[in-house]
Amino acid sequence: MLHISAYVDSRSREISRLAPHVLHIRMKLPTITINTEQPILVKRLLPGLGKIMVQRGQEVRALDTVAQIESPSGYAAVNVARHLSRHELDMDEVMHKEIGDVVEAGEVLASIKGLIRKRVAYAPAKGIIVAIGPGWVLLETERTVTKIQAFIDGTVTKISANRGVVIEAIGAIVQAVAGFGGEAHGLVKRMVDHPTDYMDPSDIDDHAQNTILLAGQSIDEDVLRAADAHGVRGIIVSTIDAALLDLPWPVKVCVVATEGFGDRPMSSHTFATLRHIIGHEVSIRGVTPSLTPPNFFKYETPRSIILAPTSQPKSYSAFDAEDDETEHQDLAIGSRVRVTRGQYFGAISIIDSFPDTPQATESGLVTPGAYVIVDRAKRYIPLANLVQVT
């Protein structure tokens, strides 16, 4: 323990010695987006080669299908050797069909003359012959069509042949922290007056069908069940209980949490931004990045976001962008930040000042940080616990 303390003290002295020089360096933090009017670029790509359903320059609505792909989803194996009662077969001699042929249920696949009668192997279902092996035949019996919707109202500005499209618009973006339920689109309906309010299940009726509800501080299972029963498409809330991610009876409602997990009020800045889009049609994506398999959104940024396009883009072009990742920006006094860890987790405020040297936190760790206004007071927050809000 003494050796660890000595190491920490020596590192702290080293950081303090370098701090005056470090503060002259342009500091950057990871960024999140909370903006009411900015370019929106969304990539919609298929998991494989498929068919593009739109053209470049075409205006699309959020629920329009922009691409689709057919993929095998059912197979049937036929044991030809058993049906013909032969252990060894020359498949070229007994087969009536070839790879790629379409066969109907009950159609003859292969046959062989016996001493008494002719032995026959029949197709068990309608399908396509996709493989022929020593004594067996494999049929593809079902195909599933996967359709990719536009997700936002906008203009198709780029097409990747047989893979997908890029859609652009100008609108509001609020990057959330957690969520579940995939994607949803609908009209925003406000259910609470303040970010500290809670939505009651009895507040949800048939007028909420096909809408996205703006809830308050948190929701419970009763609210989620009521929303599902009344056909609500999505809920925007401050925080959620992690237990909602694994309900024994799953629901179809998409949920995004702007502040993450727990039971905390939504930041006033975020709530005000969301009230700005009340009555607008918005698109939301409920995903918790740290809990999502790496390839779940392989071709899209794995974030929970809320998009409300308000107009078409003018000078912004997808052809000038490599991807839709937010760039890190310079950190300065007055920069808006969100606290990502610790006692003030979820708070959104501004940088008040930077100390000349690293300071000690409440836990005793000496680390570079900034003074942030939280609860009307200056709090020292380590830079490692901050992300910049743009």
Image (spheres, helix red, strand yellow):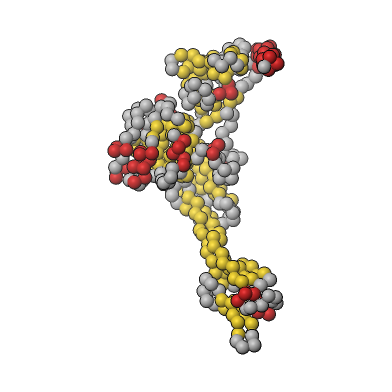
Of the 4 image quadrants, the one containing the N terminus is: top right
Q: Position of residue 313 (x, y in %)?
A: 49, 40
State the residue at coordinates (62%, 81%).
111
Whether residue 28 is visible, yes or no, is: yes
Please name whichever residue, 125 or 243, is drawn nearer the observer in this view of the structure: 243
Extreme residue toward the bottom, this view: 116
In the rendered view, tell whether residue 258 sits above or below residue 62: above
Residue 159, given in percent of the width and then of the height, sits at 56, 50
Residue drawn 56% across the image and 23% down it:
385
Residue toward you, 139 or 354:
139
Image coordinates for residue 333, horizontal then vertical, percent? 54, 17
In-front residue for pair 276/292 = 292
How many dots with numbers?
0
Q: Does residue 184 appear in this view?
A: no
Please report the residue visible at 68 percent of the width from the left and 14 percent of the height from the top: 2
Residue 317: give x, y in percent of width and height: 55, 41
* Residue 346 relative to residue 128: left or right: left
- The image quadrant that residue 256 belongs to is top left
Q: What residue is at 37 percent from the left and 31 percent from the top?
A: 216
